[in-house]
Amino acid sequence: MKTYLYPAKSEWFDLIKRPVMNLSDLFPVVQSVFNAVQQSGDNALKELTLKFDKVQLTQLAVSPKEFQTAMKIVSEELKKAIQVAYNNILTFHESQRETIQEITTTDGVICWRESRAIEKVGFYIPGGTAPLFSTVLMLGIPAKIAGCKELVLCTPPDANGNIHPAILYTAELIGITSVFKIGGSQAIGALSFGTECVPKVDKIYGPGNQYVMAAKQLAQNYGIAIDMPAGPSEVVVIADETAIPAFVAADLLSQAEHGTDSQVILLTNSEKVADNISKEIDFQLEKLPRKELAGSSLNNSKVIVFKSIEECLEFSNLYAPEHLILAVANQRFYTGKISNAGSVFLGNYSCESAGDYASGTNHTLPTNGYAKAYSGVSLDSFVKKITFQEVSETGIQNIGKAIELMAEAEQLDAHKNAVTIRLNYLSKH
Amino acid sequence: MKTYLYPAKSEWFDLIKRPVMNLSDLFPVVQSVFNAVQQSGDNALKELTLKFDKVQLTQLAVSPKEFQTAMKIVSEELKKAIQVAYNNILTFHESQRETIQEITTTDGVICWRESRAIEKVGFYIPGGTAPLFSTVLMLGIPAKIAGCKELVLCTPPDANGNIHPAILYTAELIGITSVFKIGGSQAIGALSFGTECVPKVDKIYGPGNQYVMAAKQLAQNYGIAIDMPAGPSEVVVIADETAIPAFVAADLLSQAEHGTDSQVILLTNSEKVADNISKEIDFQLEKLPRKELAGSSLNNSKVIVFKSIEECLEFSNLYAPEHLILAVANQRFYTGKISNAGSVFLGNYSCESAGDYASGTNHTLPTNGYAKAYSGVSLDSFVKKITFQEVSETGIQNIGKAIELMAEAEQLDAHKNAVTIRLNYLSKH
């Protein structure tokens, strides 16, 4: 990790720069995949799976028998662990339900909002070496709380045409409607257009490689909503002298193992802390099975020493990290100063892994600086909030004149007339 | 309006079809505008304004003197009307603030969300014949409640290089930070990239023509968030025998005057009601100043008679209208059956104009079927909800084992280690 001491503000914009992702270069490839899926449906999906995943599938949907097998393969120990995570995620996301609140804005004018589930939702779950069944929990649980009717999951098959049993177990636990063995941009295409066997959905969620990200972006041009734009995962740790160096080092390494494009940044108000944590990283790195991956990702990473924790937070807000760990004394004192972050971890025992799996918060979070304008996935991501208004005779008499004047000034006469005709009626009845 | 009697469900998918909008055809044009703005900043904006708006501007920003003049030109009557709308919009959007709710998901694990304003927001306000100062209220009020720091407004100048005084008055009333005389896709480009005088923003809001819509979509590829995708405005009215035909006709016409691509649909459970409302439309149309516009938009419009109000609602949910008016008896009885709509108007006196201007609900709503997955603009549109978690020593001891097992199953060893190192530490201290 490269260390920077007390950088001037003029240097901050360089320090917050992430590796440039130019997804638009991938659009032509993804567009041709979309065209194939739109034109040839399941046949195209099978051909693309043979081409990209090197598997010949006769059936895209996971069969009941495959689910049954998965239920047996997953260990009881892991099932119990998944249940712990499930319960906490459920509790936290249940608390996000909005109660209906009728507001009388003017006598006779009542307004309120009601949440309605997005009917059909599609999840992309990456496969490969790290089978992210935890993401099935993070997307599936709020979708079920919201009341989504159809939950469709796509995930790439392995070399034998199978899906990791933990993914199937979790899908079954949650009540995913159907699971398909489809990966990459073709999965996003299938969910966007629908095929003989894959239903078209209203909104697509979940992480993926650059092709999946580009495909989600392109899907928006076809009227499909997405959870958020995506980029490589990242963490900022702010540590002072009360931080335990071994803990911080472990947190930085856990982010680094995600891949070589992972962003790992340590901010501190003490050169000594920076030094101690750097030493701990070297020490722990040696013992990691994925040490080469984590090591090369650390090459892009930064340790920055500032004058104060406040300055660390100011820098962090400019960077807008996906994950922010505050390993400082009086951590609650600083929460009000955080303006841009996906999810925040307070104190020495709130490691990022806790939020990744089991604290209850969602791990689908805005990366790449998107935390400036986007929230992570929550119950809100699975509902629309419909506004209602009920205007009584008294109500239209109270606000009618204002509407007439404004509509007239905007030269929308028929808008004005819709009110005038009601006011005239009331004056005669 | 064309009338359909008791269509079979197999015909519904044809009936809900909207005119196809292919924004991607406009992308090359918009991309070249974006490139010019990115490369040449204010100079490009001035050249494009001369080209598209036929005005030579020396200054893009509206000057304090222009604001002062506007304050004098707008009538006291209109100012009072705007204040009525302002108060109601403020009351309703204030009620959307979320209180912080700390949730203990497991003993020692506390999770919560806190809202933070999106710092820099950009508004596009169409100019031309209908100066939509009401949209300045609808975007500006929730932005101010949220605490956005910088509110930047772009709107095209008229032939003399001026902005409509009601737009300037409303901008001043709300406290918009700066107003620029820039229209079309170049305005979206300016807000996306920033220029010498226009600040780059985090999120762009507001309606516009097809070029503006395409530009907002393209802006997303540059990491800029947008309020929602857009399309032509639309209304569905569901009326039974208790509806007052003159009112319904006026509501349908007020939607029709928006333009020839406006969608206007009447659903009813009575042929007689359909007939009476159609007659009223013909009668009222004759008296409208914009009767040709409204008339030609009615050519694309539909009256559909169903067997019951429930069937009308089922059809409406499939269509997912921007505005839905329920002019039926016991209107509250039906609200639970509405699953897809932007904003709903209940009863004979809740005309769409009320929500367009002054009831308090927002008028920036999802069109084109997007109501299936998107909400209208609300306070939520101007904040991110950051999740926080505080895991104590007890907390990590309670959920640590589950995290270790899940991380191991996902083959993320460093994630597991971040927990193990803490559990080991606690067992020794």
Image: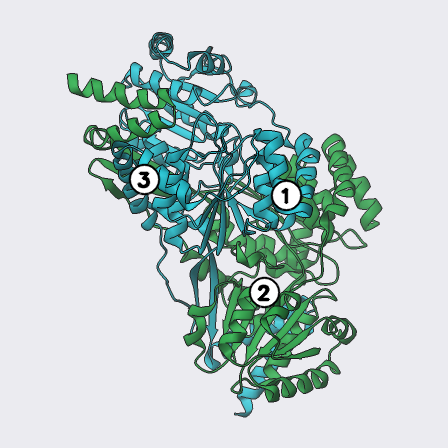
Chain colours: A green, B cyan
CA distance separating discs 1 and 3: 40 Å
Toward the viewer: A136 or B210?
B210
Helix, strand or loop at label 2? It is helix
Q: Which residue is mark 2?
A: A319
Say if labels 1 and 3 share a chain.
yes
Three-letter amino acid code at the position of disc 3: Gly
Q: In this rendering, would B75 be left or right of B343?
A: left
Residue at 61 percent across and 86 percent down: it is A271
Categorize mark 2 by other alpha carbons within 10 Å: few (<14), some (14-19), many (20+).
Answer: many
Residue placed furthest toward the bottom = B429
Q: Chain of mark 2?
A: A
Q: In this rendering, would B334 be left or right of B159?
A: left
Categorize mark 3 by other alpha carbons within 10 Å: few (<14), some (14-19), many (20+).
Answer: many
Q: Chain of mark 1?
A: B
Q: Is residue B146 above or below residue B2?
A: below
Three-letter amino acid code at the position of disc 1: Asn
CA distance separating discs 1 and 2: 30 Å
In this rendering, the label closer to the viewer, 1 or 3: 1
Residue A178 visible in the displayed image:
no
Corner quadrant of residue B5? top left
Residue B107 image point, x, y percent: 42, 74
Q: In this rendering, would A226 be left or right of A101?
A: right
Labelled disc at residue B43: 1
Q: Is residue A209 above or below residue B55?
A: below
Labelled disc at residue B360: 3
Residue A22 image point, x, y percent: 73, 51
Residue B152 image point, x, y percent: 48, 47
Q: In this rendering, would A157 be left or right of A343?
A: right
